[in-house]
Amino acid sequence: MRGPAGRIDRWVAFFFGLAVAALLAFILLPVVAIFARVPPGTLVAQLHSRVALDALEVSLRASLSALAVILLFGTPAAYALATRPRRHSATLTTILELPLVLPPPVAGLGLLMAFGREGLLGGPLRAVGVTITFTQIAVVMALVFVSLPFFVRQAIASFQSVDPQLIAASRILGAGQARTFFRVALPLARPGLSAGAALALARSLGEFGATLMFAGSLPGSTQTLPVAVFTELARDLDAALAIAALLVAISAGLFVGFKLLLREPHPSWLDSSSSTSAIV
Amino acid sequence: MAGQLLVDIRHRLSRLSLRARLELGGETLALVGPSGAGKSSLLKAIAGLIRPEEGRISFLGEQWFDGASRIHVPPERREVGMVFQDLALFPHLTVLDNVAYGVVARRPTRLSGPRRSTRAEGRSRAADLLERFGIGHLARARPRSLSGGEAQRVAVARAVASEPVVLLLDEPLSALDPQTKARVSADLWSHLKDLRLPTIVVSHDFADVVGLADRVAVMEDGHIVQAGNSHDLLEGPVTPFVAALTGVNFFPGVAAPRDELTEIRSTEGDAVFLSTEPAVGPVGVVVFPWEVALSTLAPEGSALNRLAGPVRRVSGVGNRIRITVGSRPSVVAELTDESLHRLGIAPGVAVVASWKATGTRLVPRPG
């Protein structure tokens, strides 16, 4: 029997569908628009421009350096925080996550006021002859600051999902803390760590505000792809679109890779009883 | 060989406070108790996973833990082998590498010689051990593809591969279904006998471990309330739990002399028991179920102890049937199948349970 209730259900279903369609269109339209104005051939030709190639090189080098720093410091820090009682680590974790909610220009300004010429550490740095502002080191620092939480959050969750009994078993079998970390915790947390690294890398490649504030926009030195999009826009719209298209392709590729890494929370070699899906 | 491992620790846990003394020679000790009694925590303290607040743990004079002088040897330097309740096999390693893990990881010790084993040596020792345990064909398998019994053997092989000085087994049979349990336990016990290691087996089920253990220690609320061989526990349980565990009736009471006998007032109900054994003050009354007679009429003869009530439960298999009488306190009698039918006993039937004063054994009861 189809009464009024049936009709209401159909309307509700219609609105649910409409909401999905509206949001999809809203997200896809700007992405399509980047590729729509200029024919693909011209886009590819524009990528051979000096500005685009320089920016690509700066972006890749800085993002990969930032990723290396994040992995080197973020992994042990995440392990330390994941294996402490939660009430001890909660505040520390929140501090490391702060850049997630900090507007990037504010982050850039903060870095400037800490490490810049007039900053808190400006005097000591000058004394040892180190200038950071407007160098590639500044780019890397800005990227690390902004993308670190994307890795650390994921890494803490991954380490927490490692069964503590496996850690205990390793210790009793004679392995010290270091061997236990490298032979048990790290391999078991690896899928989640890789996903976190992909996310942090994607965030680094797209970083704009903090980089511009702290490292400026020197072509061939500190001008990353997103910064180049902004500066080229004032000069040559087609060039800006070409760089934007390149960024869309790289970011989308990384994001799909991230999704694939997380698609199976229990990879075939993980025992379902001892791993958990906290890495979702 | 008595007293190789000496444990005397106090440690506060969230639900209970652990105060345990334990001595282990070259024997197998079953540590039995209800879940939450602190058995696993005691094992963890011995293994070094928990640092107790106070006390001492030593093995052959070597201090593993000493609260007073702040000694706490980390787990990796204690040379303990442990089998966890859910086995804790490394899911990312093959069976062979699981078993070789400890051989390679273990630092040089008095036993292993002057240097660490190489990976190849570890694998070859692991392969030998897998053969001995009859699971050589599983060397390249991953833990998740193993059956419960196979995983169990791998876990034991891994625990003993690096030649520990003490072996700890936490509920080694609880992860298994009843069908495989019997087969696996026989198998496990025979391997443990061959190994001749000082061993502690933790279980909540007396029946699971009684056949294996040289000695049984019963743990309740963080304390070891009684330790001895299983016969001692059956004949003289000091708490109702020990009695229930070993299958005897146990009534706490207060004893006083009466004529030439001893009269015991039960702390539950208004029952009074008579015993030929002399005692004064708080005692435990132990009555073996096979010494309790049941009748549907008031019994005649010399049986001075009587408890009346309806039959609550009839259980058991074969020729030994246990009948629980809903008296105060409740009592369990053991009858043969024939007498059960002759008396027409079934749940709900009113009966009188009786036994002689010579059948009332008295054991000391902690105040």
Image: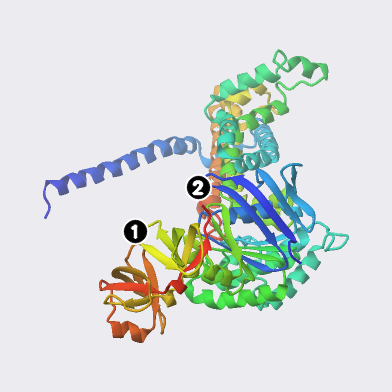
Q: Is residue B65 above or below residue B265?
A: above
Of residues B326 and A56, the one nearer the viewer is B326
- The residue mark sitting in front, 2 or 1, is 1
Q: Is residue B195 above or below residue A191?
A: below
Q: What subunit carries mark 2?
A: A
Quadrant of res B1: bottom right
Specify whether B252 is left or right of A221.
left
Q: Residue A263 placed where, x, y %?
A: 51, 53
Q: Residue A154 placed where, x, y %?
A: 57, 42
Label at residue A26:
none
CA neighbours of label 1 inside 10 A, class few (<14), some (14 to 19), many (20+): few
Q: Which amino acid does label 1 sit on?
A: Asp
Q: Which residue is drawn at 62% across and 62% down?
A: B89
Of residues A146 and A89, the one nearer the viewer is A89
Of residues B206 and A168, the one nearer the viewer is B206
Q: What residue type is labelled 2?
A: Val
Q: Which residue was labeled with disc 2?
A: A280
Q: Residue A224 placed where, x, y %?
A: 64, 30
Q: Which residue was labeled with disc 1?
A: B270
